Amino acid sequence: MKRMMPVLSSQSDTAVQECPSPGKLVVLTGPSGVGKGTLLRSLLERHPEIYYSVSATTRSPRPGEIDGKDYYFINRSQFEQLIAAGKFLEWAEFAGNYYGTPREPVMDQIRAGKVVVLEIELQGARQIRRSFPSALSIFILPPSFQELEKRIRSRGQDSQEAIAHRLQRAREEIKAANEFDIQIVNDDLETALNSIEAVVFS
Ligand code: ADP
Ligand code: 5GP
């Protein structure tokens, strides 16, 4: 996994910064399969004024995913060049692929007064908490681990190997829930959505 490590470490390129005003930075995190994407899609339908940050990834597109809408799909060498050029607000390696948040559009949108939501995994969420202590951080929990496993499997878009990897990682990630400002259990979708809406717009 470390074979092509770029010059920067994801853990060390973060200095504490103020979030630009007048907007708001919101980090949504939680284990893979917990329903972050589903919740975010519904939140954006209700609030089209929210800016969703499209990440870059080296993962292959899943059926139906669109480049530039779901992710910017790039290769490892392109990703590593962007890391070295400081173009990511945060980045992490997850299940064998890189994922990162493009810095400039997020900063621009916060300056323009928008609520900006990042939907990212644990390492990246920790980096944002360190760099931007004033960001609002939300951790989404499953009602149970069994239900999480069911959701990952029923999504039906990952290989058996990828599913096993994600489940193993999920067990670790859930332990970190208390590091975040707010914990929300995604049992009933509508109830979880209302809770997110309440904290984002409080
Ligand atoms: P994530 O983005 O966290 O990886 P997804 O949004 O892809 O998770 O959701 C994983 C699966 O769980 C999807 O099939 C989705 O429809 C389902 N799901 C999401 N939220 C709920 C919920 N509250 N109850 C039941 N199934 C859900
Ligand atoms: P997936 O491959 O299922 O789309 O995403 C895998 C994990 O990567 C999810 O937990 C998702 O939230 C996270 N992720 C997506 N984009 C980013 C990003 O820009 N940075 C980080 N750190 N994680 C991301």
Image (cartoon, rainbow, N blue to C red):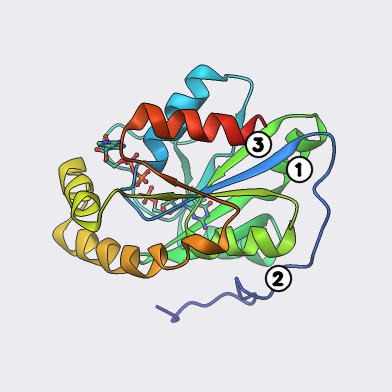
Residue 47 position in % (x across, y down) = 57, 20
Name which of mark 1 and mark 2 comes first in the sequence: 2
Label 3, residues with CA under 10 Å away: few <14, some 14-19, many ≥20:
many
Name which of mark 1 and mark 3 comes first in the sequence: 1
Q: Secondary structure at mark 2?
A: loop
Name which of mark 2 and mark 3 comes first in the sequence: 2
For image coordinates 43% across by 25% down, the residue present is 42
Q: Indicate whether 9 appears above or below 195.
A: below
Q: Which numbered dot is residue 94?
A: none
Label 1 belongs to which residue? 107
How far apart marks 2 and 3 lie (CA) works out to 21 Å
Q: Secondary structure at mark 3?
A: strand
Q: Is mark 1 within 8 Å of ligand 2?
A: no
Label 2, residues with CA under 10 Å away: few <14, some 14-19, many ≥20:
some
Q: Is residue 11 left or right of residue 161?
A: right
For image coordinates 57% across by 65% down, the residue present is 80
Label 2 belongs to which residue? 13
Label 3 belongs to which residue? 116
Q: Is residue 145 visible?
A: yes
Q: Amino acid at mark 3?
A: Val
How far apart marks 1 and 3 lie (CA) works out to 9 Å
